[in-house]
Amino acid sequence: HGRRRGGGPPPPPPPPSGAGPEKEDLGTLPADIEVKVIKGDHAGRNGKITQMRAGGERYAVVLTGGDSVVIEELARHEIEAVTPGKKDSIIIINGDLMNSTGTLIGVDGTDGIVKMDTTNDIKIVELRSCAKLVRS
């Protein structure tokens, strides 16, 4: 009783939905956004992307918050976009509105309420799809 036909190990569980290769999951980041370093020598510091290199694999980042301002070239997996706060300028980094800019006028759970720059429309966008834009 209780034995499956065919013997052998049970089938592996299906991967969680939305899981894919790490590269694809991270996506590329635009210049002029605030990022946080999450791995490596500069972990914990914030900075601003000044340039994308190697097709989005590496980024030139101006790091702030230390004794000095440092420009480092960091790999994509070493940085993450800083979640914007209310009244921040933002750029949308994935989805249908990718590369659109606006102002975060409110937060509702995991969604951001964004007033779009070009149309002044109000859009509801997942906060994780928004990055804090640092205008020079």
Image (cartoon, helix red, strand yellow):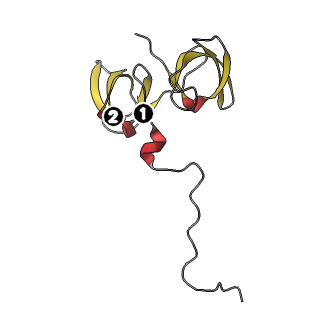
Q: Which mark is residue 28?
A: 1
- Where is residue 59? Give x, y as percent: 33, 30
Q: Is residue 41 left or right of residue 122?
A: left
Lower position in the chain sequence, tag 1 or tag 2: 1
x and y percentages locating residue 64 in the rendered image: 35, 20
Q: Quadrant of residue 62?
A: top left
User: In the structure shown, which secondary structural element does the residue marked by tag 1 occupy?
Assistant: loop
Question: Which residue was labeled with disc 2?
Answer: 55
- Amino acid at circle 1: Thr
Amino acid carrying mark 2 in the image: Gly
The residue located at (68%, 17%) in the rendering is 122
> Vertically, is 72 above or below 133?
below
Q: Residue at x 62, y 11 (%)?
A: 119
Q: Is residue 71 left or right of residue 100?
A: left
In the structure shown, which secondary structural element does the residue marked by tag 2 occupy? helix
In the rendered image, the vertical position of residue 46 relative to residue 25, given as above or below: above
